[in-house]
Amino acid sequence: MPELLSAPLVVEFPFTRSLGPVQSAFLTGLRERTVLGVRTEDGRVLVPPVEYDPVTAEEIRDLVEVGSCGTVTTWAWNPAPRRGQPLSEPFAWVLVRLDGADTSLLHALDAPGPEAVRTGMRVRVRWAGERTGAITDIACFEPYDGEPEVHGTEHDGQFDDAVTGIVAPARLDYVYSPGRAQTAHIAALADHRTVGERCPSCHKVYVPPRGACPTCGVATTDRVEVGPRGTVTTYCIVNIKAKNLDIEVPYVYAHIALDGADLALHGRIAGMPYDQVRMGLRVEPVWKPGGRHPDHYRPTGEPDADYDTYKELL
Amino acid sequence: MTHDVAIVAFAQTDHRRRSDDLSEVEMLMPVLHEVLAHTGLKTGDIGFTCSGSSDYLAGRAFSFTMALDGVGAWPPISESHVEMDGAWALYEAWVKILTGEADTALVYSYGKSSPGQVRDVLTRQLDPYYLAPLWPDSVALAALQAQALIDAGSVDEPELAAVAARNRDDARTNPHAQLSGSVPQGEYIVQPLRAGDCSPIGDGAAAVILAAGDRARDLCERPAWIRGMDHRIEAHSLGVRDLTDSPSTRLAAQRAGVFERPVDTAELHAPFSSQEVVLRRALDLDDSVRVNPSGGALAANPVMATGLVRLGEAAARIHRGESDRALAHATSGPCLQQNLVAVLEGEDRA
Ligand SMILES: [Zn+2]
């Protein structure tokens, strides 16, 4: 058993989202240092605002300006901030009910330590220096013992150059381990060998192996070397160049059943005119120095395989 | 017509901090084989298969399709998947049997938290406009709830520690548990929650088999009949909710029939000690009820399978004759946002 493989895997995505009228007004308001809530039919003011009443599901649109000061309704001291969180020094997570609001907003509170934080304490918004129309336009809250102001005035929600969408970037870091079966397969590729696994029940050889026979639902255990030669079972001609791919179009992408395998794998066919690739063509892998997989497959020059020898693998 | 549906078999992995040597399907397959072996059924005998998992845990798209290899999906089977805890897959399977479209079902779920940072991963289920950009992690949100409970006078930190200690003490008789026995409360992860108040991070899988009517009696000596099941959700904005209460749990319990007669056992899906306090109050559980004899989520938390394990553990207790009427609860989302409650009963023994 080769040593278990693992590698960093980063998943990153910038979710681009459109905003409805209420969210647009709220986030644009933050950019202009104005906090807006929305009034429900029974007169409660929700901050942050939503477009539908969480109790009645009625559409709600009546915007209200609330204060930038408020009261902590609950808190939690975060001694070790994580990536992406509002402050990099230890801080308190807080739910804050802003003056004039009936519900609480989640954010961070900049405080020297947990002993400086309590439920019921007064806080105010610290605005971010550069504001774009996002919840992070509130940099954090800070302790504040000034007088409460009266709020709750109607607001038309109109601002110049309203924010209508946000980009919410996300990044998650993983360490990927492919497991026993795929580790053995990848390790063998390093020696330019292709290794599959045989199902102990139906005796099919799977390559690349995933550890289980999808037909029988049992572990595939017997390791079997397959190839290196194989047969094209089906193919397509690619006419559009993919981003960052250094291959001239058109080229042929094919399913290739390696000799001894009961499942076709994917590969590019080169070393012959693209329009002469055909089902049944006999091919062999071509490795490039340092390559982790065959770079492509080329014709062996053998006579084509008989259809009956690969029809089950289509 | 209505069908009586029961959980007739349950299997789970030993839950471990990491399982780098196993792909998801390799981790899952022994559990599938074990649960089938309990009943003597083969894949081809199963009327409906439903699974629960999440691509975000391992960072792989459509990972449940790979896990299907472990089921043996050829010849074609009737199959479905929920991107949720397997408890909700069980709910779907239960409905499928109630409609009469199947008389047996295989339900499984799995989660590998070890490849990523589960605290970060779970932030991606939050509201993307107001919450997710701040990356409030799962412990932080639970800590806000715990502080709200403390402020309300419902619990204090030593009582939270006692909840954690009792669960892990009970886990000593659970060979699958990841954490059992005396576990130090440790430092604050996010105050007021210490390490001991939080469920362990780990990998694992679980599976159950459901069957209807006489089929259940054929497959299991003492089936765990599902007398009722319901699931409810609360407003997604945390600041709209009273975090010290769980009205969705109470309503689901009421609709599932929990309050009609006392239960003797409750398997509660509480990934944090403070959440057990909320759930006990919502469900009116007093000290006569055996809560989490398995050790609960504080002993093993294979995310996406933890709720299904609660249903399985409650059922297994009925199978063994240790319970006659058990409650099983599963949760999803921050601060007990979504809650599923089921009532399981064994028939009177001669
Ligand atoms: Zn097989």
Image (tube, rainbow, N blue to C red):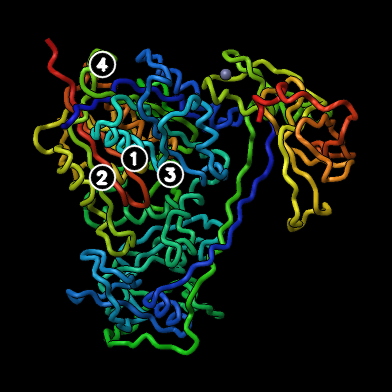
Tag 1: amino acid = Trp
Q: Within 10 angstroms of label 4, few (less than 14), some, or many (20 or more) residues?
A: some
Circle 4: element type: loop
**A119 with respect to B207 (left or right):** left
Mark number displayed over residue B83: 3
Chain at tag 1: B
Residue at the spot 32% in from the left edge and 32% down from the top edge: B310
Front in this rendered view, residue A143 or A305? A305
In the rendering, at what x and y percent does residue B94 appear? 28, 33
Mark number displayed over residue B320: 4
Residue at the spot 32% in from the left edge and 34% down from the top edge: B93
Residue A88 visible at all: no
> Could you tell which of marks 1 and 4 lies nearer the N-terminus?
1
Marks 3 and 2, how far apart in space?
16 Å
Q: Within 10 angstroms of label 2, few (less than 14), some, or many (20 or more) residues?
A: many
Marks 1 and 2, how far apart in space?
9 Å
